[in-house]
Image (tube, rainbow, N blue to C red):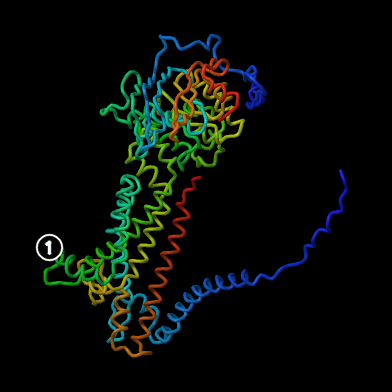
Amino acid sequence: MTTQQLPEPAGLRARRFRPAEQGVVLLLGAAATISVLITVGIVFTLIEEGSGFWGSVSLVDFFTGTEWFPVDRVYGVLPLLSASVLIAVLAALVAVPIGIGSAIYLSEYADERTRRVVKPILELLAGMPTIVLGFFALESVTPALQGAGIIPSDQLFNALAAGIVVGLLIVPLIASLSEDAFRAVPAAMREGAYGLGATKRVVATRIVFPAALSGVMASIVLALSRAIGETMAVTLAAGTQPNFTADPTEPVQTITAVIVAVSKGEATRGSELYQSIFAIGLVLFVVTMLINIAATALVRRFRTVYH
Amino acid sequence: MADSRLTSPPILHRPTEGRPEPRMELPELNIQADAGLPPTADEVVVFQATGVNVHYGKFLALKDVDLAIHRNEITALIGPSGCGKSTFLRCLNRMNDLIPGAEVGGTITFHGEDMYAPDVDPVDLRRRIGMVFQKPNPFPKSIRENLSFGMKVNGIRVDDDRIEQVLRHAALWDEVKDKLDQDAYALSGGQQQRLCIARAIAVNPEVILMDEPCSALDPISTLAIEDLMRTLREEYTIVIVTHNMQQAARVSDRTAFFTVQQLDGGDRHGILAEYNATERVFRAPEDPRTQDYITGRFG
């Protein structure tokens, strides 16, 4: 074997400047920063624009007042908040069974062809303009409820019809996300249960559903915050009458409906009424944020780890 | 004894020229002194497959299999990838029913009755024919719930005695008796697989089908499962698919060798090449393809 003089190994200390890499990092970082800044900016606007309001209306009156009557400078948030929550709860009562039911059907029972047809149609419902749903509530749901004797025939606006259409709106959200969660449960787990002589129903309810629970919860909570922030359909269907009630047959006015009414009305910029919509907007924001925090905690608690 | 199993000679043995040399030295076989004889007529046949074809859609995965599986024996299904051995196993508890497009032709009888007759309930059938899978697949529940699930489904009363009995049966009791209410995923892979075996025997099946039960396990856990299989053989009929020929040689009474038949048109499907007492298959295979496979010349 001949000894050969090898070339001197290249030194390590020649760090290169790569402008493309730097540029990409900068661009992507800017994109991420912008979305954070926008969120912060919105919160800041809510606080800033509403700040004058807190000077003229007492916090206690605002949070405990059961009447919203700006003409007399009575600003109690409870009727608005309760209306938003009432409609979200009604929507959930409609959407959770239908959403989870269709998710189980699609993931456990339907064959591939059915799923390929049904799922996009279901998701189409999520893209329905909400003003259309509002008219659907006024033109179809409320008359049907009147026909069934649930709503007095001389009363057009009610929380129930609004809750039902918002429920329809969030069905696809629950169905689609829950179906993803069900399908993420490993096939091996289903086979293990089938191999023990379990029926489809038992596999779906006792194995797949619990294993996917965290995903299902996440879908419900996401749908809830969508429902509580829904505006057009509830403004049309539920009315414009602040009403502190838990009775779904009565007309109510949600936080979002008040914001619409005030901002399209004559309230001058900087007036107390104008400032009040930022205050209630902040309340809505906090409620939605609390729901999301609760959701994260729930998901963490119920998470099943499978490998 | 355990050592000899661990240090069995390598399976790859390539004769240099001409006829293959005397085959590899075999690992110790767990078969009776009189084993190696062809099946006798008075043995109880649990499954009888006749002319079984399995299609996945248009693809013929398994062609024309005739096979009898005998009571209280361990039958090993071996062969190269794609030979249809797992497909065949899954015919025995109608697990293929769950795969869209899968179709089983020919007949398979279970105690003389056609398993695929229209009035047979596959759910009830699976209660009598348990299954253990390639990867341990405990439910994401506690150890106790893993066992009680199948028992409840089958209307068996769940009590602590029964749980203990089943876990002892699966050689797992001593390791888990203090943590029955802990998550099954806290167990090691080998323990999980024994839990899956326990889960299967908790519902009193007659047969246990095992689809490469040790392929995801380390050698020590593998030996623990093999020991367990020998015990279980007293009460159950076991059919095991394995990639590991030494495992087949160590634990089984009979071995079925499946292989891939390549047709001129480019089509390929699995066939049963040879079925005999395990010792016969390994020491004096009749089919040259078996010989090639067990001596490691292909597969």
Q: Is residue A262 above or below residue A79?
A: below
x 38%, y 58%: residue: A219
Q: Position of residue A240 (x, y in %)?
A: 24, 77
Horizontal side of B188 relative to A157 (left or right) equals right
Q: Is residue A28 visible?
A: yes
Q: Is residue B43 above or below residue A99?
A: above
Chain for mark 1?
A
Give the quarter of the image for residue A230.
Answer: bottom left
The residue drawn where x is 39% and y is 74% is: A283
Residue A80 higher or lower than B97, as above or below: below
Dot 1: what SS? loop
> Residue A22, percent across and down?
62, 71
Residue kind at label 1, given as amino acid type:
Gly
Q: Compare residues B52 and B268 and report the one nearer the observer.
A: B268
Q: What is the count of numbered marks? A: 1
x%, y% of residue A65? Answer: 32, 77
B129 displayed left or right of A93: right
Q: Could you classify mark 1 by the number of other residues whose Cα lies within 10 Å: few (under 14), some (14-19), or many (20 or more)?
A: few
Along the viewing direction, whichever of A90 and A216 lies nearer the viewer: A216
The quadrant of the picture occupied by the N terminus of chain B is top right
x, y percentage for residue B292?
Answer: 57, 24
At horizontal 45% and vertical 17% (from top left) the residue drawn is B72
Residue denoted by label 1: A149
